Image (cartoon, helix red, strand yellow):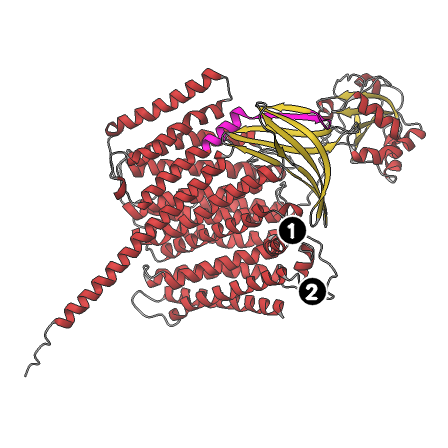
């Protein structure tokens, strides 16, 4: 029954998406001021659809939790012996389930928008919800026609075939939902941008409605990428934290577009400038998240992640992509010329700095996009290439370094127009820190150019991040400004981690006999023994490593090489020793014929800063949302109070004496 | 931004991408990397012996006489164990097999040959995959048919199974 109810809820939700779309379009066709016949249905349709889609997903969760093996998806992706937490998270560890999660979050955010957002003109809201319904409809069709998650088996299976063991990890269990929620948040920004474009309402009040969605999506994407990078670092056992793999790029590109959009929507909200550009970025950000879905699932690109690869699904997503993104860019090309130009500003102004950074972010996005798609292009001519760090690192750095420098100075500039001479002290201070740090590092050793530049920029950015607070009463600084300070400081922390990892990492690859000792950094690592261990659905060999720093007390590390038996697959579980100034990273490999074991050891100074920085950036975003919401709630309360007072005053007026 | 022409640029770029992606989706995906060196002469190389028991391998060893097999392998490679009996079968048919051991150590090579048999007349040691890459091989094991003029005629990717043996014999015949 569960599966049938879930499927019925999905069909009903799809029908409501049609109603939402049609009624929204009808509202758009009626001239302004007149009542549209179906307009009253738009909001309730969105809310009910949200309820049904979430219900459908909840039922699938339940089916996974009780391991209902009569459902094909459960039988082929789960196993009765799996720990409960991974049974539940297995719901979205496969193609169908993750698409249902996608649609559930999409419908839920549409419902939230319909229920609580009252600031926009009703026509714009109708158009926005119509676009939202149109987007949702495509994904309902995708699920119902080609990837039905509730399909029954003719005969229930005796036992499930398990879940990819790489996904049986708590970090990864929550990494995809975070990213999905971020992608879907961008879909709301997309719908709002299209709604505003269709009704020619691209103005600051529209930007204020859009801003929390963009910020929220951006925070989730930041967290998702940070978690994904950390997962790859400790689970895949290669010791790297970013590989420029197509799937990683697929999550980075929407983040870059969302970062640009977040800044440009702030300019639009505060200064009524950058109207067309904001709309363009709104479409672009969502395009990038759709493109990511396409690249990951269609298998047109070969990737270490390659999962759920299916050309037929690829064609479906490509068709959706063509419909939404092609349609959006067509409307953009036709309509954007009619959007009135926003306010003008001087080059040396805060808007000017933000525009510069927007351009740099877009350039980095173009670099990443080109590098990701280039193999696709050359393969069309039967040439195989693989694009990796030697291209991405320098090419993106060319634009990232000027961007970071302007990021340091931009928040110090005034809106509209400013004289650089006014902030010459700050500029000189930042320049002095950059040059000082580079000189200091070069004095102690010679390092590659990019890490060296990073080591120079990071402290300067940290100083520059707090400079906007100089000379201000800290108690009166708005919460949103604290958010910006924190996020920019997080960029400095993260950059510091990346630069240290690049410059100071020490690697040791050795075959060690039990009892033998290897030295890496300040650490002496002794292989005390290797023993088999067993988990719920895996067996492993586990090395016992005693780590001594400068002859101090030993710390025991236990890296494992695990073998899962359903399905059979081997993974390596790295062991990490975290110190305040870095991490020791240990992986055990194969046993050689002479009884020695392969050990890979890395000492990575300050590598954890990369992810702490990511968390700080996301926290900055959270503060910005909180600050904006607080101001918004205050405004609403004041408006209600004002309206109440006016009503009271009117009630006190003496009744007019009727004329005789 | 007010330039009308500029507003169409995103759509044009997107259309290009969509067309390319649609074309690529319809293409068969080939998982093997075929060598572009087929039909070309072997590059010049001279490798040291991989272990004390056999001489090393150089381009000159392929010239004159009958066509030969060039087998790219390694003692650390599991499929190489699987193909060892087939190489023995080829040797029994009178085929000369010259090996190139990739990133290997003399004691490991000797161990491997002691355990799984030695079908080779010579084995060169390619410690940094230099020759392997030069002949367009992307993995181990791979086997190449080289004719008496030193030209690469045929490439077999992966381990040699029992039904690949007649194919290789036919290719050797063709290369005469």
Q: Is residue A110 visible?
A: yes
Chain under numbered label 2: A
Chain under numbered label 1: A
Between A311 and B115, the one nearer to me in the picture: B115
Between A458 and A561, the one nearer to me in the picture: A561
**What residue did someone put label 1 on?**
A310
Location of residue B7 with respect to A83 vertically, above or below = above
Location of residue A622 with respect to A655 vertically, above or below = above
**What residue did someone put label 2 on?**
A70
Q: Which numbered disc covers residue B129?
A: none
Q: Describe residue A412's horizontal placement relative to residue A236 as left or right.
A: left
Q: Distance of mark 2 from mark 1, alpha carbons?
A: 24 Å
Is residue A511 highlighted in magenta?
yes
Mark 2 or mark 1: which is in front?
A: 2
Q: Secondary structure at mark 1?
A: loop
Chain part drawn in magenta? A495-516
Residue at 55% from the left image edge and 29% from the top image edge:
A604
Dot 2 or dot 1, earlier in sequence: 2
Q: Is residue B149 visible?
A: no
How far from the left and from the top, in percent, is residue A355?
35, 38
> Quick one: quadrant of the N terminus of chain A?
bottom right
How far from the left and from the top, in percent, is residue B81?
83, 34
């Amino acid at each position: 029954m569960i599966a049938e109810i879930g499927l019925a809820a999905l069909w009903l939700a799809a029908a409501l998406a049609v109603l939402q779309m049609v009624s929204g379009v009808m509202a758009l066709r009626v001239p302004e001021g007149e009542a549209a016949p179906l307009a009253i249905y738009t909001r309730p349709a969105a809310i009910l659809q949200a309820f049904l889609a979430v219900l459908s997903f909840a039922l699938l969760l339940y089916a996974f939790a009780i391991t209902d093996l009569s459902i094909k998806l459960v039988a082929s992706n789960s196993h009765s012996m799996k720990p409960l937490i991974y049974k539940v998270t297995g719901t979205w560890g496969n193609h169908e389930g993750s698409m249902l999660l996608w649609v559930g979050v999409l419908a839920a955010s549409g419902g939230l928008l319909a229920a609580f957002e009252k600031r926009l003109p009703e026509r714009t809201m109708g158009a926005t919800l119509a676009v939202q319904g149109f987007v949702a409809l495509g994904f309902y069709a995708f699920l119902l026609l080609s990837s039905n998650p509730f399909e029954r088996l003719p005969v229930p299976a005796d036992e499930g075939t398990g879940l990819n063991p790489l996904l049986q990890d708590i970090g990864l269990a929550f990494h995809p939902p975070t990213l999905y929620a971020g992608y879907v948040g961008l879909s709301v920004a997309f719908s709002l941008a299209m709604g505003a474009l269709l009704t020619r309402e691209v103005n600051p009040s529209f930007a204020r409605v859009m801003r929390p969605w963009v910020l929220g999506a951006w925070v989730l994407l930041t967290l998702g990428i940070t978690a994904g990078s950390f997962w790859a670092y400790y689970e895949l056992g290669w010791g790297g934290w970013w590989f420029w793999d197509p799937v990683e790029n697929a999550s980075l590109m929407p983040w870059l577009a969302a970062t640009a959009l977040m800044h440009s929507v702030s300019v639009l909200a505060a200064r009524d400038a950058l109207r067309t550009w904001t709309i363009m970025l709104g479409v672009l950000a969502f395009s990038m998240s759709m493109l990511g879905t396409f690249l990951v699932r269609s298998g047109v690109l070969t990737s270490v992640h390659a999962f759920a690869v299916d050309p037929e699904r690829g064609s479906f997503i490509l068709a959706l992509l063509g419909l939404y993104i092609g349609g959006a860019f067509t409307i953009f090309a036709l309509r954007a010329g009619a959007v009135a130009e926003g306010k003008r500003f001087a080059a040396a102004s805060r808007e000017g700095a933000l525009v510069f950074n927007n351009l740099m972010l877009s350039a980095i996005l173009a670099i990443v996009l080109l590098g990701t798609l280039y193999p696709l292009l050359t393969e069309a001519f039967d040439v195989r290439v693989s694009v990796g760090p030697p291209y991405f690192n320098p090419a993106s750095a060319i634009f990232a370094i000027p961007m970071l420098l302007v990021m340091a100075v931009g928040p110090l500039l005034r809106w509209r127009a400013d004289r650089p001479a006014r902030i010459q002290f700050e500029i000189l201070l930042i320049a002095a820190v950059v040059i000082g740090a580079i000189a200091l590092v070069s004095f102690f050793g010679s390092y590659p150019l990019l890490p060296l530049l990073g080591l120079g920029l990071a402290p300067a950015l940290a100083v520059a991040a707090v400079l906007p607070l100089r000379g201000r009463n800290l108690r009166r600084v708005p919460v949103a400004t604290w958010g910006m300070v924190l996020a920019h400081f997080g960029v400095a922390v993260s950059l510091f981690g990346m630069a240290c990892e690049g410059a100071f990492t020490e690697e040791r690859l050795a075959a060690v006999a039990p009892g033998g000792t290897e030295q890496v950094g300040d650490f002496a690592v002794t292989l005390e023994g290797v023993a088999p261990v067993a988990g719920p659905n895996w067996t492993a060999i586990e090395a016992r490593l005693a780590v001594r720093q400068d002859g101090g007390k030993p710390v025991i590390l236990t890296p494992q090489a695990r073998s899962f038996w359903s399905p059979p697959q081997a993974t390596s579980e790295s062991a990490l020793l975290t110190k305040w100034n870095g991490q020791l990273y240990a992986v055990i490999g194969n046993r050689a014929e002479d009884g020695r074991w392969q050990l890979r050891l890395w000492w990575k100074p300050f590598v954890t800063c990369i992810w702490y920085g990511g968390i700080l950036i996301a926290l900055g975003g959270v503060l910005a949302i909180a600050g904006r919401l607080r101001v918004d709630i205050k405004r609403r309360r004041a408006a209600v109070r004002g309206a109440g007072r006016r009503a009271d005053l009117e009630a006190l007026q003496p009744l007019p004496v009727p004329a005789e | 931004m007010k330039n009308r022409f500029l507003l169409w640029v995103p759509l044009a770029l997107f259309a290009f991408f969509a067309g390319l992606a649609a074309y690529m989706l319809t293409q068969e995906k080939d998982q093997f990397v075929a060598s572009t060196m087929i039909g070309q002469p072997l590059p010049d190389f001279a490798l040291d012996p991989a272990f004390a028991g056999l001489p090393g391998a150089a381009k000159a060893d392929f010239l004159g006489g009958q066509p030969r097999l060039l087998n790219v392998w390694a003692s650390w490679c599991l499929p190489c164990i699987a193909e060892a009996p087939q190489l023995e079968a080829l040797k029994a048919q009178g085929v000369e097999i010259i090996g190139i051991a990739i990133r290997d150590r003399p004691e490991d090579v000797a161990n491997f040959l002691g355990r799984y048999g030695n079908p080779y007349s010579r084995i060169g040691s390619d410690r940094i995959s230099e020759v392997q890459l030069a002949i367009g091989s992307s993995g181990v094991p791979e086997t190449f048919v080289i004719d008496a003029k030193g030209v690469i005629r045929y490439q077999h990717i992966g381990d040699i199974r029992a039904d690949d043996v007649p194919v290789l014999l036919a290719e050797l015949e063709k290369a005469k």
